[in-house]
Image (cartoon, rainbow, N blue to C red):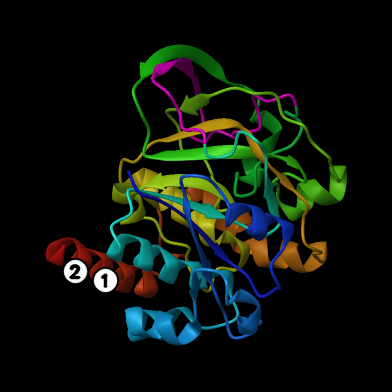
């Protein structure tokens, strides 16, 4: 089983990237950008901007530069090179000792709501918070969940949580400014739920349909998570495996970049018209061609 960790960065190697590069049993790929100090990554498996364009110039052009969505070219690289599992991580998420542990067959909690969306933080020890990309219109009732148990062999997507600064939206962060230490548990849902690209493992089959959408601000990975679930792929949430020492952000700017989600996510089950699919469709063409030739 071949496994690859993929990240993007415009910074010099961080504590997180240095640790991921040494992760036992995993290969590591840094996807560069125009601003990335290329010379600092001579000793890394580094996907230079010129090499990204060789993977697919039209896709590269459609995504554009100086954006986290360059990571999609890393996904193309992973599929082209035959990796079975791909972990997408951020360069400010420092791996803990349990990072990379896979879900094992077991009976776990399955949570449901009456309004078709599930907040993965609603059943944690920080249930006053909500995950980035959860519809704000449902926050007041997000903890109204029902619970059953079911045995699962495996999942398409494993979204582990994060200690330190969690992945919440700008509104939630302005109110609470939390520092978290989540308890350990595995759980899933039969509703639509957001997951991110900062500490998530996907099977190669899921990755062929997962995309970090460009031109949608801070909803890139969130829209990708919902579209993937609409295609039938399932996600399990797991224990925290990183500590996020969050890079500096202007929360007002973050809020503006999340507005497209605040306004539209609640309708995503029935309506995708607010999502630009041009780059996604090109990505699907590229990865399908890889599947046909491999």
Q: Depth check: 79 or 27 in front? A: 27
Q: Is mark 2 on a helix, strand or loop?
A: helix
Q: Depth check: 124 or 18 in front? A: 18
Q: Residues within 10 Å of mark 2 (few under 14, many from 20)?
A: few
Pointer 2: what residue? 289
Whether residue 261 appears in this view of the structure is: yes
Q: Depth check: 39 or 61 in front? A: 39
Q: Residue pushed farthest front?
A: 43
CA distance separating discs 2 and 1: 5 Å
x 47%, y 28%: residue? 189
Q: In which quarter of the image is the N terminus?
A: top left
Residue 269 left/right relative to 6: left
Whether 104 is among the magenta residues is yes
Whether residue 56 appears in this view of the structure is: no
Q: In which quarter of the image is the C terminus?
A: bottom left
x 38%, y 74%: residue? 279
Q: What element carries label 1?
A: helix
Q: Could you tell me what secondary structure mostly forms the magenta stretch? A: loop
Residue 110 left/right relative to 156: right
Residue range in magenta is: 101-125
- Quarter of the image holding residue 145? top right
The image position of residue 242, as x and y in percent, is 67, 42
The image position of residue 81, as x and y in percent, is 30, 63
The image position of residue 150, as x and y in percent, is 40, 14
Pointer 1: what residue? 286
Vertical arrangement, residue 42 with respect to residue 227, above or below: below
Vertical arrangement, residue 64 with respect to residue 174, above or below: below
């Amino acid at each position: 089983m071949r496994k690859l960790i993929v990240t993007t960065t415009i910074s010099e190697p961080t504590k997180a990237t240095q640790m991921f590069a040494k992760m036992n049993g995993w290969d590591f790929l840094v996807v560069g950008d125009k601003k990335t100090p290329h010379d600092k990554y001579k000793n890394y498996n580094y996907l230079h901007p010129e090499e990204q364009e060789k993977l697919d110039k039209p896709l590269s052009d459609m995504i554009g530069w100086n954006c986290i969505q360059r990571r999609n070219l890393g996904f193309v690289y992973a599929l082209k090179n035959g990796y079975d599992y791909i972990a997408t991580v951020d360069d400010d998420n420092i791996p803990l000792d349990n990072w990379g542990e896979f879900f094992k067959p077991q009976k776990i909690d399955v949570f449901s709501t009456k309004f078709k969306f599930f907040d993965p933080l609603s059943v944690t020890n920080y249930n006053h918070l909500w995950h980035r990309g959860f519809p704000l219109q449902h926050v007041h009732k997000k903890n109204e969940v029902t619970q059953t148990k079911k045995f699962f062999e495996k999942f398409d997507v494993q979204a582990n949580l994060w200690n330190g600064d969690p992945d919440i939206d700008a509104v939630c962060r302005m109110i609470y400014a939390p520092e978290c230490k989540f308890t350990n548990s595995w759980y899933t849902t039969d509703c639509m739920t957001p997951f991110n690209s900062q500490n998530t493992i996907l099977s190669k089959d899921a990755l062929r349909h997962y995309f970090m959408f460009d031109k949608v601000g801070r909803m890139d990975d969130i829209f990708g998570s919902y579209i993937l679930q609409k295609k039938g792929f399932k996600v399990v949430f797991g224990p925290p495996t990183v500590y996020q020492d969050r890079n500096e952000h202007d929360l007002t700017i973050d809020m503006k970049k999340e507005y497209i989600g605040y306004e539209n996510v609640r309708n995503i089950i029935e309506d995708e018209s607010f999502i630009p699919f041009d780059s996604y469709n090109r990505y699907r063409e590229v990865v399908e061609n890889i599947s046909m030739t491999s």
